[in-house]
Image (cartoon, grey):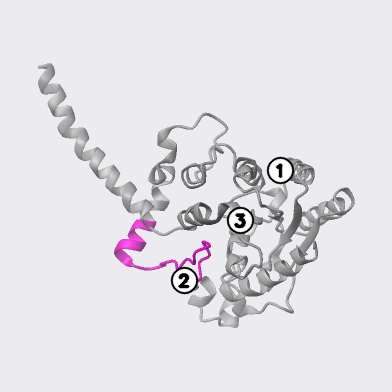
Amino acid sequence: MQRKFITYSLLFFIPVLVGFLAVEWLTISIPSHFSVNKKYIEKSGDSIETLILGTSHLMNAVNPEWMESPTLNLASGNQFLDTDLKLYNGIREKFPSVKNVVLEISYSHFEIAPNGKDFWKNSLYYKYYDVNCFERTAYFKDRLVYLSNPSFFSERIEEYYIDKKNIPSFNEYGFNSNDGYGQFTKQNYNKVKIDTIKRFRINIEPNLNLFETNVATLFKLLDSLKKQNKNVVISATPMYLTFLKKRNPEILNRRDSIFNVIQKKYPEVKFLTAETDTIHYSLKNFWNHSHLNPSGATIFTRQLESVLQSFK
C-alpha cells in the first residue's frame, strides 16, 4: 500500500516538477535588463565607475554605451528609495572603482509607498545580482524568477514566444533600444491624439507619512554616500507636457523643498533636474507621458555626462 502511494505520488509530482522547470527555463531565457546586467557585471564589474539607481524613468533615460566612464544602470521599474538603499548596500563592495552614484527623485518619489521586504523584484536582485533585499534569510526558492510574479511572467512568455511582440533589443549594457512598442510610437507621435489622452499613470494623492518615511531613507543613503566620498547626482527626468500640467502642486512643492534642504545639508551633491525641460526635449523624445525613448535617452545621457564631468 505504501509503495503504491509513493508510486502514485511520483507519477503526479514528477510531471508537475518538469512542467514548472520548463516554465522557469522559458522565463529566464527571455532577454531582460537584469540578465544582461549580470553578464556586464561578470565581465566589467571591477572597472565600473558610475552606478545608476532609480525607477524605469532612469532605466529608460541613461544608456551606459554613451557614458565616458564605465556605467552600470541598476534602475528598474517601480524600484523606489528603500530598494535603492538595500541594493546599493548589498552591491557596493563588488565595485571597488565606483566614484559616482546617480539617484532619482521624480515628481512624486517621496509620496509613493516603499517597495518593502516583499517586493516581487527581490527575487531578481537575488538571482542576478546576488543581493538579498528580503530582510530575512534567503532560500533557494527566492531565486526562482517565474514564482516571483507568475501573472507578469506568464504574459511575457506569451508575448515573447507566441505573439512575438514587444521584443526588447538590449545592448551589452542592458539598455533597450527598441522603441517599437512605446505608447507614443503606437500613436505615430500624433500630437493631437496624444494630447487628448486623458488617462495615464501619475500620482496626485498627497501622503505626508510616506513623504517623511521616504525622505528619511534618502538622507540615510546620502549620509552613507558622503562617508564613502562618492560623487552624487540627484536627477529628475523629463516629463511630457500633459504630465507636467497634471502634477499636484502640494506634492511638487514638498519634493522641491527637499531639494533646497539637500543643497544646504549636502552642498557637494549636484542636480540634473530636467523634469520641465521643453527646450531640449520634444514629443518625439518620449516613450509615453513620463518616460523617454532611446532618442530622448541620447540627450539625457549627454546631460548627465556633462554633470559628472563637473566633479573633475
Q: Is residue 61 above or below residue 180?
A: above
How far across and how far down the image is residue 32, in percent? 45, 58
Mark number, residue 47: 3
User: Image point 46% across, 74% down: which residue?
Assistant: 180
In this view, the residue in front, 243 or 238, is: 238
- For label 2, the residue is 181
CA separation, marks 1 and 2? Answer: 33 Å
Q: Look at the numbered disc 1 and give the secondary structure of its residue.
A: helix
Q: Are circles 1 and 2 on residues that touch, CB within 8 Å? A: no
Start-end of magenta stretch: 156-177
How far across and how far down the image is residue 135, in percent? 57, 32
Rendered image quadrant of residue 197: bottom right
Q: Nearer the viewer, mark 3 or mark 1?
A: 3
How far across and how far down the image is residue 280, in percent? 71, 78
Amino acid under disc 2 = Tyr
Mark number, residue 210: 1
Circle 3: is it few (<14), some (14-19), or many (20+) Cα within 10 Å?
Answer: some
Q: Is residue 94 visible?
A: yes
Q: In the displayed structure, does residue 263 sit left or right of residue 87?
A: right
Mark sitting earlier along the chain (3/1): 3
Q: Main secondary structure of the magenta part?
A: loop
Q: Look at the numbered disc 3 and give the secondary structure of its residue.
A: helix
